[in-house]
Amino acid sequence: MPVPPRAAKPSDQHAEWLALLPVDGPFLALPILTEAFRQGLDTVPDRVMERVRAAYDQFTADPATLCRAWIDFVLAEVLGYDTRVLVTGPQIPVYEQRPGGPIRPDAAVVTGGGQERVTRLLVYRLPWGTNLERSGDGPAPRDAAAEVARASGHPLALVTNGRLWLLVHARSGEPTTVATFDADLWLEEPLLLRAFASLLSLRRLAGVPEDVTLAGLFRRSAEAQAEVTDTLGRQVRQAVELLVGEISRLDRESGGELLAGKDPREVYRGALTVMMRLVFLLYAEERRLLPLGEELYDASYAVSTLQRRLDGEASQHGEEIGDRRTAAWPRLLATFRLVHDGCEHEALRLPAYGGELFDPARYPWLDRLAVTDRVVREILDALLVLRRKGQGAQRLSYKGLDVEQIGHVYEGLLEYSCVRADEPYLGLAGKLEPELPLAELERRRDQPGFAGWLREQTGMTARQVEAALAHR
């Protein structure tokens, strides 16, 4: 297949079409796509593009009559499904899925024969004007296709009414994904047609190693996204703990006036709100939902440029410079207010998004904090650099996250809170990550059975505890 022009990095190209594609549910992860399509999306040859243009013009002139012919054209000419692999009629299994009778795909892409026969894709060719999202009687077509995919163990389906082409992915025990390709946009946004052809071509379904087939890409994306979500959730929690610790230090220095009358749970919720604001801003900046790239925003508001500036200052002047400066925190507060209130200045225009998350009235005491630049830098580092065992440090691309992943991180952190401690506590490593009074650790340190007690408290193995104690 022809190699696409390399005007942009493949990762940028994938990010562009992903931003154009409406998706409901977890989709293909950007790093997985970039690895599978190292040269970018497959191209659609000029001759095929011309035939698509001509066929679509004919179809839109009389869609009710020509819908089936147009669908068959796309399946054959764009995706490469010939009669050898696109089976119909009695060759398609009938799946009993709900009261009222069987749900039957209209066709299926099947490769191999005998024991090597594999169903790659279930196909539903529906009449022009069929509502794929809703149904007055029974499940909507997209939901019916997901039921069949999940029950049959064939996770991929393509549902179309001629204009909309829904790529459905559904596995038992996993959320359903529906990506909507609109044929009306294929000529206006040819990148979407290339993405459609690249993902659903016969070659991508069956002509490549299993881990880079479309089904394999979904499976690997789910695994990668779950790992990223878990790691990000852990690091956001650590960042919340870091901010809570800084707030506690500032409260002690104020003689308790800073948090007078504040419940510890409110302090935790305030710190968590700051983290979720930052996560949202990083997500929005990478997806160009905020004016990243405009001079005033970059210099005075952007979170991503602030992180680079703080890193530069630490490299140039040493880590200690951050302990003596408190300029980054007011900048973050200004950014939060900018998103909530908006701006109508000639140098920067941004609508007022409002909303509870960025409402400055929720936690007004945040404005009175003098958080050091070092703490802000460490918080941003926790949000931007993933640290996974055996993989080293890797910068996180928020373009590759979806709303569900961010929601999962937030929901997981709602399970935690904080309490006031009257004595020093020490956080220990290990699977259980316990926080224990320092006095108790000192008391048990020289007693028999200390190593066994640590194993129980931390979830470490005997060897891990032995190694940790050897470094005392």
Image (spheres, grey):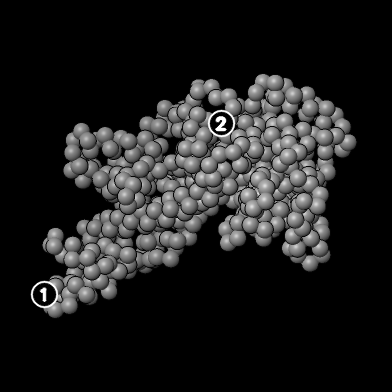
- Please give the label number shown on residue 332: none
Residue 187 seen in this snapshot: yes
Query: Which quadrant would residue 186 be assigned to in this image?
Result: top right
Q: In the rendered structure, which amino acid carries the disc numbered 1?
A: Asp
For image coordinates 83% across by 27% down, the residue present is 58
Above or below — where is 16 with respect to 428?
above
Q: Position of residue 199 (x, y in %)?
A: 61, 38
Q: Position of residue 470 (x, y in %)?
A: 13, 62
Question: Which residue extends farthest front?
Answer: 114
**Residues at badges 2 and 1 in contact (C-beta under 8 Å)?**
no
Residue hosting label 1: 446
Q: Position of residue 166 (x, y in %)?
A: 69, 44
In front: mark 2 or mark 1?
A: 2
Q: State which tag comes first along the sequence, 2 or 1.
A: 2
Q: Quadrant of the C terminus?
A: bottom left
Above or below — where is 183 with respect to 269?
above
For image coordinates 69% across by 34% down, the residue present is 80
Give the class, few, some or many, for how many residues have Cα within 10 Å of label 2's Cα (few <14, many ≥20): many
Say which element carries label 2: loop
Q: Which of these two is toward me, 103 or 17?
A: 103
Say which element carries label 1: loop
Above or below — where is 98 with respect to 49?
below
Q: Position of residue 78 (x, y in %)?
A: 69, 32
Q: In the rendered structure, which amino acid carries the disc numbered 2?
A: Leu
Q: Which of these two is toward me, 147 or 307?
A: 147
Residue hosting label 2: 41
The alpha-carbon separation of the residues under discs 2 and 1 comes to: 63 Å
